[in-house]
Image (spheres, rainbow, N blue to C red):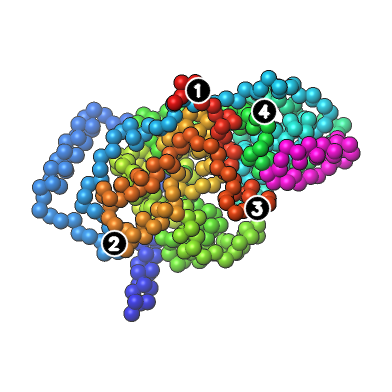
């Protein structure tokens, strides 16, 4: 009997999903429907009319004898209790951004590079932020090994299939000149060395200063060393201060995006700020992310099977069998759009809040996104803030569009990642570097217990939920703290994997407290 009800619910869910897909025939048509609404500035008469209707609706709602029917299929109950009003400054202001400043200048012991006739060629692997941090590591490694760095080749064969070159994404001339006092950088190998034998070396992950000093022995036999992978090639801790600060100069100063990306990013920030303060939400609910993590909570059986097949057919994903329930309980799953909506509302953000979604295509489209939009109607993507003409040159270049999302995230008033991936860590570190801008990192493991209580009817939305969620995230808002070490009990090289990334929190090497700080 129960099984029959579950099958019927599943069929009903699929019918609803098909209706949503038909009503939004394509992602571009959906964006075009909302772009005009976003870009159009309201007239004074429309504002007056809106205020009148809003007041009338509130009065009518308070005194109306009608009751809003409760949807039986809705798992999470809504409380009739109004959420507590949170002061504006608590919602938007960073509490601990005073008394700290970026400090990346070299020490007095720092010497000018020797510019010897030795060359390091690099192939940067992964997505945008994996490549950015990898390139910054390679700048530091070239410095340690006293080598000339050749402008890195970018990954064109990974999942993203992006044909962008270095100069398409980054300001190449600025990169070379900004680091000329640190490392000699050239656009390409000298022609006389193009055919010379070269050492192909996979450097060890999270390697120490001593490791690379030992690797300099390769110069005895080779003039060129090629590095096939650049990600996580340098340890997070126990490096000289000048090397750590060089990594920060490379990432935050030298690796500036190309002028077209920088200009459009700044333009979109200004355009969005016309509507006031905004949250940048890094919503990791793309198909590949859900498939890779094995997270299927809130999805239909058909969707879960589709993700399983994708994981099975992706050769470089080593783990094939994943228990979705265990993943979620352990806090290893990204929050769903619905959970993000509950989370932000519990923190006190009003429905009028503007939210910029920094993400790829959301799995299930508006079917899943509607559960967030019902709470926060002012959701926008870059495709809604920018015009089609402005985005045309970036089409089919995932790393370039990701760079626009990166700018929008770093410059936002509040940044919220639904999952701790490469971009989330890079943005958090950059915002710390710029003055500990407010970054709210959801306690995914802790929130699972809260959401499950809501599903069981043991907890409703309102002041109790807000108090629990607010207290849970009191110290998860990007405040200054030293970088976290490895997990206790883990020995050997495995401990490096559990350390907090240097680029997620470059304190204290690249962030200094001022004399006036208490």
Cα separation, mark 1 vs mark 3, equals: 36 Å
What is the number of the mark on residue 514? 1
Where is mark 3, residue-wise?
491
Q: Residue at x 18, y 56 (%)?
A: 68
Task: Tell me if residue 145 comes above or below residue 422 in the rendering.
Answer: above
196 falls in the magenta region = yes
Residue 108 lies left or right of residue 366; in this view the side is right
Any part of residue 99 in sight: yes
Where 48 sits versus 344, above or below?
above
Which quarter of the rendered picture does the C terminus lie within?
A: top left
Q: Give the range drawn in magenta.
A: 195-224
Pointer 2 residue: 457
User: Which residue has dot 4 on it?
Assistant: 242
Q: Position of residue 258 (x, y in %)?
A: 59, 30
* Residue 376 seen in this snapshot: no
* The N terminus: image quadrant: bottom left
- Looking at the image, which is closer to me, 130 or 502? 502
Mark 1 or mark 2, whichever is nearer to me:
1
3D distance between C-alphas at marks 1 and 2: 49 Å
Identity of the residue drawn at 82% across and 27% down? 116
Answer above or below: position of 22 versus 198: below
């Amino acid at each position: 009997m129960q099984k029959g009800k579950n099958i019927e619910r599943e069929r009903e869910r699929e019918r609803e999903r098909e209706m949503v897909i038909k009503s939004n025939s394509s992602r571009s048509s959906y964006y075009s429907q909302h772009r005009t609404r976003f870009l159009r500035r309201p007239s004074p008469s429309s504002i007056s009319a809106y205020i009148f209707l809003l007041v009338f609706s509130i009065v009518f709602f308070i005194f109306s004898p009608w009751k809003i029917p409760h949807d039986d299929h809705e798992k999470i109950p809504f409380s009739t209790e109004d959420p507590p009003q949170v002061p504006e400054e608590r919602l938007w202001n960073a509490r601990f951004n005073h008394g700290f400043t970026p400090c990346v200048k070299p020490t007095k012991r720092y010497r000018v590079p020797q510019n010897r006739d030795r060359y390091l060629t690099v192939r940067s692997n992964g997505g945008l932020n994996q490549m950015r941090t990898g390139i910054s590591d390679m700048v530091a490694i070239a410095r340690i090994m006293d080598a000339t760095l050749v402008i890195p080749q970018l990954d064109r064969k990974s999942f993203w299939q992006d044909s962008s070159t270095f100069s398409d994404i980054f300001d190449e001339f600025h990169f070379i000149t900004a680091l000329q006092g640190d490392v000699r950088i050239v656009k390409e190998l000298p022609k006389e060395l193009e055919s010379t034998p070269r050492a192909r070396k996979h450097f060890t992950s999270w390697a120490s200063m001593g490791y690379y000093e030992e690797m300099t022995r390769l110069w005895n036999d080779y003039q060129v060393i090629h590095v096939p992978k650049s990600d996580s090639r340098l340890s997070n801790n126990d490096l000289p201060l000048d090397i750590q600060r060089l990594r920060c100069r490379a990432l935050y100063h030298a690796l500036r995006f190309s002028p077209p990306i920088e200009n459009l990013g700044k333009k979109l920030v200004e355009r969005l700020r016309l509507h006031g303060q905004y949250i940048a939400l890094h919503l990791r609910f793309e198909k590949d992310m859900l498939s890779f993590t094995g997270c299927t909570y809130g999805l239909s059986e058909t969707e879960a099977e589709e993700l399983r097949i994708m994981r099975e057919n992706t050769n470089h994903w080593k783990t094939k069998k994943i228990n979705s329930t265990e993943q979620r309980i352990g806090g290893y799953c990204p929050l769903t759009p619905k959970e993000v909506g509950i989370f932000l509302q519990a923190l006190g953000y009003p429905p009028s809040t503007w939210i910029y979604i920094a993400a790829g295509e959301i799995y299930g489209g508006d079917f899943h996104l509607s559960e967030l939009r019902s709470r926060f109607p002012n959701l926008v993507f870059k495709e809604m803030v920018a015009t089609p003409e402005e985005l045309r040159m970036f089409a089919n270049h995932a790393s370039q569009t990701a760079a626009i999302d990166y700018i929008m995230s770093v410059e936002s008033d509040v940044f919220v990642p639904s999952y701790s991936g490469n971009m989330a860590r890079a943005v958090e570190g950059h915002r710390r570097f710029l003055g500990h801008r407010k970054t709210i990192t959801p306690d995914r493991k802790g929130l699972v217990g809260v959401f499950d209580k809501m599903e069981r009817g043991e907890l409703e939305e309102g002041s109790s939920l807000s108090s629990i969620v607010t207290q849970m995230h009191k110290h998860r808002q990007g405040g200054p703290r030293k970088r976290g070490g490895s997990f206790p009990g883990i020995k050997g090289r495995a401990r490096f994997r559990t350390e907090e990334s240097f680029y997620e929190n470059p304190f204290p090497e690249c962030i200094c407290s001022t004399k006036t700080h208490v």
